Image: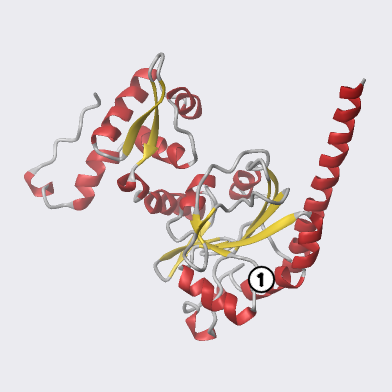
Amino acid sequence: MPQRTRLTDADADCAIAQALDVVGDWWTLLIVRDAARGVHRFDALQAESGMSRKVLAERLRLLVDADVLSREPYQDRPVRYEYRLTRRGRALLPVLIALQDWGDTWLLGEGETMATTAEASQEAERVHALRGTHLPELQLPDFDGESRDPVAADTPYTVLYCFPGAYARPDAYPPGWAGIPGAPGCTLESCTYRDQLAEFTAAGATVHGVSAQRPDEQRAFADKERLRFPLLSDADLTLTAALRLPTFRVAGISRLKRLTLVVGQDRTIREVLYPITDIGASVEAALASVRAGVKADVESGVKNGRRGSG
C-alpha cells in the first residue's frame, strides 16, 4: 500500500489536509478522472494512465478503502472487478473540473475568464480529440427533473449543444456576463435550434441543450422562449467530467463553454464544433453534419448489402 500522509495534530481539523491524505498524489486523482470518463477495468485503467500494475493496484485499494471507488465483480472465472465512483467519489468531480479550469486558464491560457478559446489552443485540440470517441453511459436531469440519457435512442443522431447559461430574466445573469468573451448569445443559440428543429427532425436528429444550470432555471428559460426540446442539467458536472469539457467559473459556479457535439446512436461522437464564433453558422454546421452522417450511413449500408449478396 502507498504510505498515507502522517497528519499532525494541527491537521486534525483541517479539511484540506484530510482530503489530501486520500487524493493527494498524482496517480490517485488521475484514476478518479478516468473512472469519471467511463474507464472502469484494471487493464483499461492501466492503459489509460501508463502506471505500473503494482502502483495501480495500490492506489485502487486506497480509493476503495476510502469509499471513493466501489469494487464490483463483472466476471466469475476468474473473478475480475470493475471500479466505479461512489457517491463520495462523484463529489470529487467539481474538484477535477476546477483543476482543469485552472490549468486551461492559467497554464495553457493567459489567465482571462472566457467562455471560448482560440482556434489553435491546446484546449481546442483536446476538445476536438473527442471526435471518434464514445460518450459513456450516463443520465442527466432534464428541466422537469426527470433523468434522461443525453443520447437519444430513437434517432440516428443527437445534437448536444453546450451553452454557458440562459435565463428567463435579464437581471438573473451574473454581474459582468456581457463582458465575458463567448458568454453572450445563449438565447440566440437556443432560439435558432428551436426555429430549425423541424429540419433537424427531418434529417434524423434529436436536439438537446446542455448547461450547468439548475433544472428550475432551465425550465423557466425554456417556457419563456417556448423551446420544444429538452434542456439537460449538468450541474453535478457528470458529463463535463466524462468528456473533460472546457469550463469557466463566474459567480462561484463552473459553467460550460459554448460547444456542440454531434453524437451517433452508437454513442460515437461524430463531430465537434469548438470554438463557436458564429452561432447561426454553428447550427447550420451541426445540421450539415447530421445530413452528411445519415447519407454516409446509408451508403455504407448499401455497400455492405451488396457485398453480402455477392
In the drawing, does residue 154 fall left or right of residue 256? right
**In which quadrant of the rendered image does the C terminus lie?**
top right
> Is 268 rendered above or below residue 199?
above
Q: Is residue 81 visible?
A: yes
> Is 299 rendered above or below residue 46?
below
**In which quadrant of the rendered image does the N terminus lie?**
top left
Q: Residues within 10 Å of mark 1 (few under 14, many from 20)?
A: some
Q: Which residue is mark 1?
A: 228
> Is 76 rendered above or below residue 286?
above
Q: Give the percent coordinates (x, y) of residue 242.
A: 50, 45
Q: Residue at x 23, y 50 (%)?
A: 16
Q: Give the percent coordinates (x, y) of residue 245.
A: 54, 51
Which is nearer the eye, 277 or 196?
A: 196
In the drawing, does residue 308 fall left or right of residue 287? right
Which is nearer the eye, 89 or 207?
A: 207
In the drawing, does residue 37 fall left or right of residue 92? right
Q: Residue at x 42, y 57 (%)?
A: 236
Q: Residue at x 52, y 71 (%)?
A: 218
Amino acid identity at mark 1: Arg
Q: Quadrant of residue 286?
A: bottom right
Q: How is the image coloured?
A: secondary structure
Q: Give the percent coordinates (x, y) of residue 198.
A: 78, 66
Q: Is residue 274 visible?
A: no
Q: Residue at x 39, y 54 (%)?
A: 94
Q: Residue furthest front?
A: 309
Q: Residue furthest left?
A: 9
> Is 257 rendered above or below residue 42?
below
Q: Give the percent coordinates (x, y) of residue 257.
A: 57, 60
**Which structural element holds mark 1?**
loop
